[in-house]
């Protein structure tokens, strides 16, 4: 056996091209630099993407918090408006209210000693608080003159009777009327 193991079967060729210029040796270096640069850019993009996702989640949390605060403020505003509406209604009620004690005193002083007031009710309506519903139960002999005296006494307080009604049951006369305040 031959100790020479390698045989060269190539034949010399003269028509082969020249070697590449030495400046082309920089191409692999540029390739690896571009590869490293793109890896750096991709890594930075990934970190920026994660940062943007975190900022988006934070922004959504802030948005949800601001929406809950807005809803709470709207509810509070609605409650305050309802409370203000109630206060306006109470103010209108109080505006329409007149002191009832002078009316009761005038009615009591207008009645003579021989006539008795068995029942008296002064009620205000919610719809028209300035009007007062008067209900009287009188017991006596001269009830018709007493009713005229009561109406005259109420006239001194600038009240007039609107749709007065009287019913007689034995000795008791029931008188129902709505007192309307006249303009000053």
Image (spheres, rainbow, N blue to C red):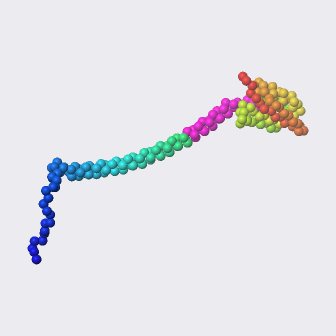
Q: Residue furthest left?
A: 3
Say whether residue 173 is left or right of residue 83. right
Reply yes or no: does residue 99 show up in magenta.
yes
The residue under the point 28% across, 50% down is 38
The quadrant where residue 80 appears: top right
Say whether residue 44 is left or right of residue 91. left
Q: Does residue 105 appear in this view?
A: no
Say whether residue 23 is left or right of residue 124. left
| Dominant secondary-structure state across the stretch colored magenta | helix
- Which quadrant holds the N terminus? bottom left
Q: Position of residue 55 (x, y in %)?
A: 39, 46
Q: Residue furthest bottom?
A: 1
- Which quadrant holds the C terminus? top right
In the image, the segment drawn in magenta is 77-105
The residue under the point 80% across, 36% down is 135
Reply yes or no: does residue 49 show up in magenta.
no
Work out whether residue 132 or residue 30 is closer to the camera in this orientation and state it: 30
The quadrant where residue 163 appears: top right
The residue under the point 13% across, 66% down is 8
The residue under the point 77% across, 24% down is 156
Q: Position of residue 131 (x, y in %)?
A: 74, 32
Q: Does residue 12 appear in this view?
A: yes
- Relative to 172, residue 55 above or below: below
Work out whether residue 40 or residue 130 is closer to the camera in this orientation and state it: 40
The quadrant where residue 144 appears: top right
How many numbered marks are there? 0
Work out whether residue 153 or residue 66 is closer to the camera in this orientation and state it: 66
Q: Position of residue 182 (x, y in %)?
A: 75, 25
- Relative to 127, residue 160 above or below: above
Q: Position of residue 96 (x, y in %)?
A: 69, 31
């Amino acid at each position: 056996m031959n100790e020479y193991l390698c045989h060269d079967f190539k034949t010399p060729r003269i028509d082969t091209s020249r070697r590449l210029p030495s400046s082309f040796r920089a191409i692999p270096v540029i390739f690896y630099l571009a590869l490293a640069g793109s890896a750096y850019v991709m890594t930075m993009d990934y970190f920026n993407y994660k940062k943007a996702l975190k900022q988006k989640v934070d922004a959504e949390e802030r948005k949800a918090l601001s929406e809950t605060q807005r809803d709470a403020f709207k509810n509070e505003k609605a409650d305050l408006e309802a409370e203000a509406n109630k206060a306006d209604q109470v103010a209108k009620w109080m505006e329409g209210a007149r002191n009832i004690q002078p009316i009761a005193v005038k009615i009591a002083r207008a009645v003579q000693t021989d006539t008795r007031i068995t029942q008296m009710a002064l009620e205000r309506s919610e719809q028209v608080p300035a009007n007062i519903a008067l209900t009287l139960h009188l017991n006596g002999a001269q009830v018709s003159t007493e009713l005229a005296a009561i109406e005259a006494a109420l006239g001194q307080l600038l009240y007039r009777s609107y749709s007065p009604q009287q019913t007689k049951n034995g000795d008791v006369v029931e008188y129902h009327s709505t007192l309307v305040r006249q303009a000053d």
